[in-house]
Amino acid sequence: MKKIKLFALTTILLLSCCIGLQAINSEALYQKITSTYGSLSSFQANVKQDNYFAQIKKDISYSGNIYFTRGRMVIKYDKPNVQRLMVKSGTVELYDAQSKTIFRSRMRPEFGKMNPVEILQLYWKKSTVKMLGSKGNVTEVSLKPIDDPSISQMSAFINHKTGIVQSLSYIDTSGNRVTYTFSGIKTNARIPEAVWQFSPPKDVQVVEQ
């Protein structure tokens, strides 16, 4: 009798888990992300960016901080060398301390968003989305863009309770991969004004692209 009761209890628990997973569908998750980030006044976090360059078969990892508010974003990397990426008013500006160079260009139309999360939202609507499973409050999703000239695949780990994206990866059509991992996330907290200010060295060279 105890074995039967134990089996019945286990079955109920398994069914409950399955029902919970089924309730997390791609459209509901997309709406949660959109609602969460749409209501943010600011976002800041530690960020780790892992790059894989397919042609030379090389991995490079960067670590630093990301900040964004409506209309502007800064990513500051401290390792392996100092870099500062500023996105504002449709312009991308990258300062590389090692070469003492600022690379400046207009933002590509497909990346005309202010942060990695908005890129995820943009591609969500023009991709085949698959839910790969959940662990705790975190759900993994895979996106396969339809006839996109730049991106061949994306994936993300998302807290489906809060709508916060914890990591985002994408692979371009040449096989290069970029992964952003966020930690120490703060939302709607004041960002120091110094974050947006930057005075490059006097001997810096500017390359317009």
Image (cartoon, rainbow, N blue to C red):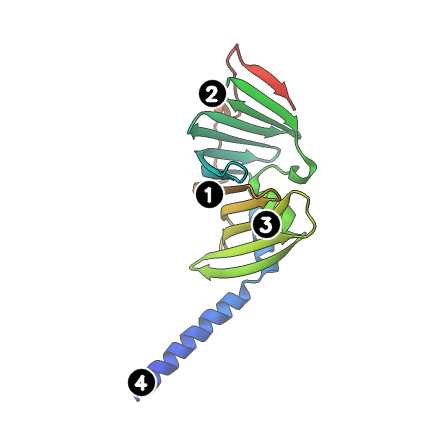
- Of badges 4 and 2, nearer the viewer stands 2
Q: Nearer the viewer, mark 3 or mark 1?
A: 3
Q: Earlier in the sequence, mark 3 or mark 2?
A: 2
Q: Are marks 4 and 2 in contact (CB under 8 Å)?
A: no
The answer for how far apart the CA atoms under marks 1 and 4 are is: 45 Å
Q: Which mark is residue 3?
A: 4
Q: Where is the N terminus found, in terms of image quarters?
A: bottom left
What is the quadrant of the C terminus in the image?
top right
Query: Which of label 3 and label 4 is nearer to you?
Result: 3
Q: CA distance from mark 4 to mark 2?
A: 67 Å
Is the residue under label 2 in contact with that under label 1 (CB below 8 Å)? no
Q: Earlier in the sequence, mark 4 or mark 2?
A: 4
Q: Is residue 24 above or below residue 60?
A: below
Cα separation between marks 1 and 2: 24 Å
Checking the image for residue 113, the label placed there is none
Up/down of 97 relative to 156, above or below: above
Q: Which mark is residue 153?
A: 3
Residue 48 place in picture, x, y as percent = 45, 38
Whether residues under marks 3 and 2 lie with C-beta atoms below 8 angstroms apart, the answer is no
Q: CA distance from mark 3 to mark 4?
A: 47 Å
The alpha-carbon separation of the residues under discs 3 and 1 comes to 17 Å
Q: Position of residue 84 (x, y in %)?
A: 51, 26
Question: Which residue position holds label 1?
Answer: 181
* Label 3 crowd bin: few (<14), some (14–19), many (20+), radius 10 Å: many
